[in-house]
Amino acid sequence: MRDIGLFKIAPKVNLSNKELLYVNLRGANLRGANLTDVKNLTPEQVKQAKNWKTATYDEN
């Protein structure tokens, strides 16, 4: 996976319908984030973030 650099994700951010290929979420705060219909994001990438369990996901 290519690292695209550091960036901050604010709690409750809406990332729905976004293309997240190669994103590095290590240490990002996903508290309350909307990740519905996100493209090219793996469960492994998500689990590197903090508070990933509180984000909203698709059913599949």
Image (spheres, helix red, strand yellow):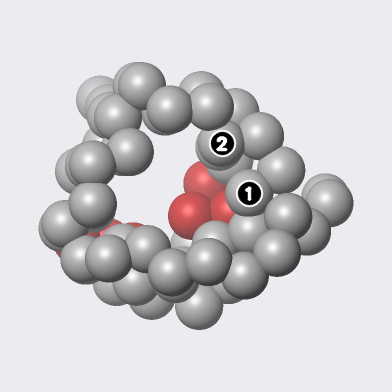
Q: Residue 52 — which label?
A: none
Q: Position of residue 46 (x, y in %)?
A: 49, 55
- Taking the spot 73% from the left edge, 55% from the top edge, the residue there is 4
- Asked whether, in this view, residue 37 is left or right of residue 25, the answer is left
Describe the element under mark 2 as helix, strand or loop.
Answer: loop
- Taking the spot 30% from the left edge, 30% from the top edge, the residue there is 16
Mark pair 1, 2: CA separation: 5 Å
Which amino acid type is shown beneath numbered disc 2? Leu
Which amino acid type is shown beneath numbered disc 1? Val
- Asked whether, in this view, residue 34 is left or right of residue 15, the answer is left
Of residues 28 and 4, the one drawn nearer to the viewer in this rendering: 4
The C terminus appears in which quarter of the rendering?
top left
Q: Mark 2 points at which residue?
A: 20
Q: Where is residue 17 in the image (x, y as percent from the top left)?
A: 36, 22
Q: Is residue 20 above or below residue 18?
A: below
Q: How crowded is mark 1: few (under 14 residues within 10 Å), some or many (20 or more)?
A: some
Residue 48 shows in the view? no
Of residues 60 and 41, the one drawn nearer to the viewer in this rendering: 41
- Circles 1 and 2, Cβ within 8 Å, touching? The answer is yes
Q: How crowded is mark 2: few (under 14 residues within 10 Å), some or many (20 or more)?
A: few
Q: In this view, does 53 lie above or below 27?
A: above
- Taking the spot 53% from the left edge, 27% from the top edge, the residue there is 19
Q: Is residue 20 above or below residue 23?
A: above
Q: Residue 23 — which label?
A: 1
- Taking the spot 34% from the left edge, 71% from the top edge, the residue there is 29
Q: Which picture quadrant has residue 22?
A: top right
Q: In this view, does 53 lie above or below 50?
A: above
Residue 9 shows in the view? yes
Q: Which picture quadrant has residue 45?
A: bottom right
